[in-house]
Image (cartoon, coloured by chain):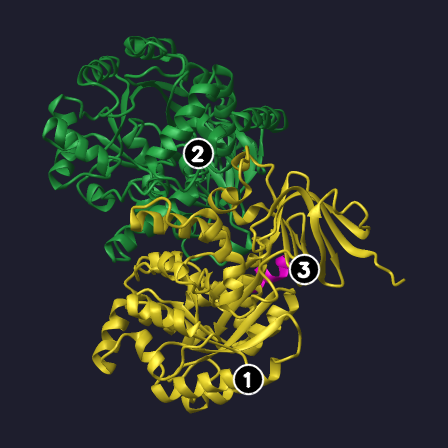
Chain colours: A green, B yellow
Amino acid sequence: MPNREADIRIQNGWVITGNAGGDILENGGVVIRQGRIAAVGTMADLRSRQAKETIDATGCVIMPGLVNAHTHLPMSLFRGLADDLPLMTWLNDYIFPAEAVHITPETVRTGALLSCAEMLLSGTTTCCDGYFYEDAVAEAIFETGIRAVAGQGVIDYPAPGVPDPSQNIAEAVSFVEKWAGRTPLITPSIFCHSPYTCSRETLVKAADEAFARGVLFQIHVAETKSEHDQMMMEHGVSPIRYLDSIGILRPQTLLVHAIWIDEEDRNIIAERGAGVAHNPESNMKLASGIAPIPELIRQGVAVGLGTDGCASNNNLDLFEEMDFAAKLHKVNHMDPTILDAAKVLHMATRGGADAIGMGSAIGSLEEGRPADVIVVDMQKPHLVPMYHPVSHMVYAARGSDVRDVIVNGKILVKDGRLLTIDLEKLFEKVAEAGRSMMRK
Amino acid sequence: MPNREADIRIQNGWVITGNAGGDILENGGVVIRQGRIAAVGTMADLRSRQAKETIDATGCVIMPGLVNAHTHLPMSLFRGLADDLPLMTWLNDYIFPAEAVHITPETVRTGALLSCAEMLLSGTTTCCDGYFYEDAVAEAIFETGIRAVAGQGVIDYPAPGVPDPSQNIAEAVSFVEKWAGRTPLITPSIFCHSPYTCSRETLVKAADEAFARGVLFQIHVAETKSEHDQMMMEHGVSPIRYLDSIGILRPQTLLVHAIWIDEEDRNIIAERGAGVAHNPESNMKLASGIAPIPELIRQGVAVGLGTDGCASNNNLDLFEEMDFAAKLHKVNHMDPTILDAAKVLHMATRGGADAIGMGSAIGSLEEGRPADVIVVDMQKPHLVPMYHPVSHMVYAARGSDVRDVIVNGKILVKDGRLLTIDLEKLFEKVAEAGRSMMRK
């Protein structure tokens, strides 16, 4: 008989399984073996399961790690650089110039490390990224141990690392080829910036390359009214119908934002099986609008929750993002029942996994799945009493309540301390980058 | 020469003064003597100021303690008891029955202690409360050392501690008389529940008693569309015009919510000098609507930020509330410039102080004022780099980033640890109350 001893047993907590039945166990645990979940159950169920290491979760919630369905990791260096501005002023006068001057493989690495540190400490175990110099981003991600879909950006303008736009797709393809199958933790992807910054030819070619390689194709779409109006003028149809007309909406496509969409657009998204990344805080802060998320979910679309980059949020805390999502749609529809806590938590876990093409692997605590697990400490004044753990996750908890984080069976955060990144050293590099940004 | 040595010197931090000029000092500090601010300045300014105790704020922000302009402290015991329900189902099937059975002086005390613990740990130094058994609430507040306006509830129905509604005003008056002048930290007040649960006679009499005693008169008003419609039907005017017609709108009046108000209502509020408490998270969660806050501020109305009670939020974190306020109005107006970070921070400090009648004492760091000061630790992955401290306070920080809290010159939180409350003992009582709530 082979050695069946497990590696880690997390015990004595409330378990939010996130399985199809929505099971919640009052006094339970999770057993991890060789990077995967070997068992989930009540403590009675797990009595006989021994492990090399035990994590006591008394007074804690044990749940699937959160999935950030949309972000731009290196942009943490632009956190709070410019707020409260019209979108085009913000982009053209602050973000684009800052990117042009300050984005190098080294700053990209620093910003990505910082974002991964923030995400891990606040319970995110998987993120879906898109940026330039994505190779440096992927190296940083790999170092931290977080799980990620990493997308090399494609845009028809000179971009950091891609001064000649005619090379943008070749760069993306070479990034995908370099990272495909290299580590189970990083899945490469291609990220076209938007239908208004990429030509039809670029969109079709980039998407074809992604589809041919079986990787996720990401695109910002229908984010602002002006984008919508521009597409109507140029193509005579909505942004979604335009993308559909060129064959880009597939189950392997992630539509980011999807705010300015009508009923027909929603039907098309649902029929094609494309996923959607919802970023309520960024959409509110930039005054872009409110995406019809309850409607998309009702139609069976896989919807994930994203923070967007730090320049428009300004943090990567998915607990906060859940709270925003849950409350925003209620007031928007004047209906407090429209998007309940369970649906929102699903969006931040399994929904996001489905949207980024990883639903068969992550987003729930079930036997056989990779062990991406977090432990949230509920013994805090703002988390007691607790009647319903799911309610607390969405409406009361903060990222800072996360105590332990496990990705692929490896403990990355223990007792609130990050094990894979030297924060002191990182903060020095961040401060240096920040000072240089202030000098222009 | 008398002994001029100070008690506490907080040094080496970024100082957000919150003074009329909005001064921010890059390397500064605050000197405290006999409960008051003796000096605010750069470290060069403060060179000669010695103190018995120093608090090093290197890498931190030093700022005025936050002011929670509206809450119901004991309701922390109902945190997450019932969510995602229509307002009337939530109130009539969950909250009112729970209050009828479970609210006693003892549970009120437990819930109030819990709320004060949560508020202090997240940087709130003043709150404006309204509930029943307010005497027990005030005792709990006093024990924790937080500053508060404490309002005894008045409603024309049997209420906890006031089984006979005909005694509701007498109870409130006796509460005010008991607590007036008793401690500089607690200011008593009278809180009429709403224009639809209090008769015209009750409203007029209660307000007169408050005005005659120079204390704040609080009332929930124009919270829901149905309240607005009911007032229109019964009185032929909006809720605000109804209150104005009976002489209730004064500078000593705090209007809570003020969502369903039109331009004429706003003009009346501005002319009468009444204050407004804005509770975006509660208003969103209950799908009540969005108050016209940018408009009220533009008209010069004193607007404070409140969390409301924990049953409809579900926490008391004013940092989160600031983030919600800043983003909600942007998307509501489709204008990212409409309520900038500085205006929102003002709402959570001096604006709130003005709205609850304490603007001459608290809400800013200025010489001679009572020393209500917080130190926020910025050396965290989600708070670096920092270009603009005010932006970080509103968009990136969480209550858990607060490190030290001083109220009236007394240190209540040090290095994230609460000095005045035994949390372990409190959690036992909270758990007991929670269990009893689950048994019904």
Which residue is identified by label 2? A310
Chain name for mark 2 = A
Question: Which residue occupies the foreground of this view, A52 or B7?
Answer: B7
- Same-subunit check for callouts 2 and 1: no
Cα–Cα span, label 3 and label 2:
34 Å
Please give the range of residues in magenta. Answer: B420-429
Few, some or many residues within 10 Å of mark 2 (<14, 14–19, 20+): many
Residue B237 percent across, percent down from the top left:
25, 77
Which residue is identified by label 1? B213
Chain name for mark 3 = B
Q: Magenta region's main secondary structure?
A: helix
Q: Which mark is residue B371?
A: 3
Q: Residue at x 57, y 45 (%)?
A: B401
Chain name for mark 1 = B
Q: Residue at x 25, y 82 (%)?
A: B235
Q: Is residue B368 left or right of residue B427?
A: right
Dividing the picture into quarters, in which one does residue B97 lie?
A: bottom left
**Do the residues bearing badges 3 and 1 touch, measured as CB atoms within 8 Å?**
no
Cα–Cα span, label 3 and label 1:
26 Å
Q: Amino acid at mark 3?
A: Ala
Say what secondary structure mark 2 lies in. Answer: helix
Reply above or below: A359 against A259.
above
> Residue extending furthest right?
B1
Q: Quadrant of the C terminus of chain B?
A: bottom left
Dividing the picture into quarters, in which one does residue B13 lie?
A: top right
